[in-house]
Image (tube, rainbow, N blue to C red):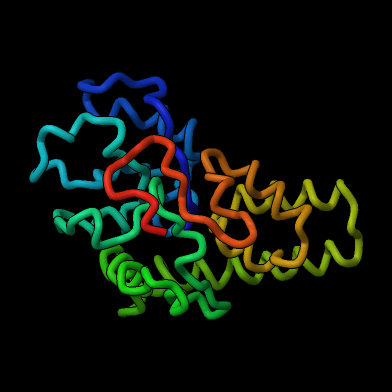
Amino acid sequence: MRPVQRGLPHLYTNGQPYNSALGGLVAKLGAYCSYCEKPLSHAHEIEHIQPKDLYPGLERHWENLLLACKNCNTAKGKQDWPLNHWLIPDRDNTFISFVYLENGIVEINPHLATAPLAAKTLELFNLNDERGKHGLLKRVIPRMECWGKAKLSLIHWHNNPTLEMEKLIIDLAKATGFFRLWMAVFADVPTVREQLLSAFPGTEPACFTTPPQPHPNTDNLPHGSKI
């Protein structure tokens, strides 16, 4: 799950219909689901971090809005978990909180004190849904396919470690989505990882230091920097 910084409202003013924020969110964060990281080629949805039906005062507030695919938005629905009970990509270091496997499954990082929060986040968005054809096609299989593309790209890079090859890899990663998978496959290629950080809009670079640091939460969002 890619940690992001949304920043100040862009192409949007608080109080406008929340759908009007779509263009600004895409410009700031890229056309990717803020939770499962899949590309949003169509059917972009705005996800209210705190459900709009339960918090009407936040329905049209920029800081309460992220991008989501239909699956993640539907899975979360009107569930109202306190913000300090789960990890939120615009205020927590969600990159180090999860482990992405080649078989398409997402696991929690058991070495962090926030592992219980990560587990609740996986549950909230049902990221490992394998129930029937729908779950596999929408959740697990896309991550498996992306992993395969990233591994093949790594082979190409080892055979031809040039700037031109790196550009092709970055272009493919942007088109394919699943930032976290590309970062995992290219874990030992710092030049590609650095380009990935800048290629995906809104990625919070402070979450990728060594050793890892908590999300700086420079927007001062509530219950941030839990990790």
User: Is residue 117 toward the left or the right of residue 97 in the image?
Assistant: left
In percent of width and height, residue 194 lies at 71, 49
Q: Where is residue 17, by image quadrant?
A: top left
The C terminus appears in which quarter of the rendering? bottom left
Q: Where is residue 13, by image quadrant?
A: top left
Q: Where is residue 149, by image quadrant?
A: bottom right
- Which residue is pictured at 55% across the width and 39% down the height? 201
User: Is residue 80 toward the left or the right of residue 198 in the image?
Assistant: left
Taking depth in this image into account, of 169 and 122 the one nearest to the observer is 122
User: Is residue 218 toward the left or the right of residue 185 in the image?
Assistant: left
- In the rendered view, tell whether residue 142 sits above or below residue 173: below
In percent of width and height, residue 112 lies at 44, 72
Taking depth in this image into account, of 81 and 67 the one nearest to the observer is 81
- Which residue is pictured at 14% across the width and 56% down the height? 80
In percent of width and height, residue 223 lies at 28, 49
User: Is residue 184 toward the left or the right of residue 54 in the image?
Assistant: right
Taking depth in this image into account, of 43 and 171 the one nearest to the observer is 171
- In the rendered view, tell whether residue 60 sits above or below residue 68: above
Q: How many marks?
A: 0
Taking depth in this image into account, of 44 and 3 the one nearest to the observer is 3
- Which residue is pictured at 63% across the width and 47% down the height? 197
In percent of width and height, residue 180 lies at 55, 61
- Which residue is pictured at 26% across the width and 65% down the height? 124
